[in-house]
Image: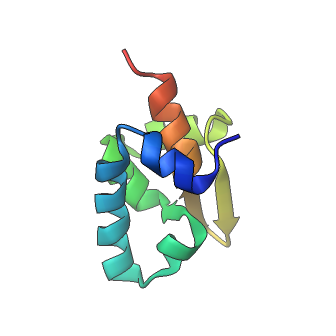
Amino acid sequence: MYSQSSLFEESPIVAILLRIEKQVSEQKGSLVALTGFIPKKAFQEFIGYGDTKVTELLQSGQLEVSQIGANKYISLKSLIQLLEKNIQ
């Protein structure tokens, strides 16, 4: 398993994810930075998928998801791992 600091140092997509995290953090406070999770909507905007595709992806178990009430949050760590797994 990756440590969060080594994961961020080694990943080629970190700049993009950190930009998303910054945008979300500016809108939602520093909770994203503290937890390592991004809201489903921010994830959806990042990958450019609609509701149906995002739901399929979340149900596939490929991403670590936290749910509080109706709100879902996606782990940045699992998102990085999914993107790296699908490098072509």
Image quadrant assignment for residue 50: top left
Residues 5 and 82: in front is 5
Q: Tell me what residue is drawn at x 45 percent, y 36 percent.
A: 53
The colour style of the image is rainbow
Relative to 20, does residue 82 appear above or below in the rendering?
Answer: above
Q: Tell me what residue is drawn at x 45 percent, y 82 percent.
A: 30
* Direction from residue 18 to residue 63 in the image, left or right: right
The residue most toward the top is 88
Q: Quadrant of the C terminus?
A: top left
* Direction from residue 4 to residue 54 in the image, left or right: left
Relative to 33, does residue 19 appear above or below in the rendering?
Answer: above
Image quadrant assignment for residue 71: bottom right
Residues 68 and 4: in front is 4
Residue 79 placed where, x, y %? 51, 43
Q: Tell me what residue is drawn at x 45 percent, y 40 percent.
A: 10
- The image shows a total of numbered marks equal to 0
Q: Tell me what residue is drawn at x 63 percent, y 34 percent.
A: 62
Residue 72 placed where, x, y %? 58, 62
Residue 55 placed where, x, y %? 54, 43
Q: Quadrant of the N terminus?
A: top right
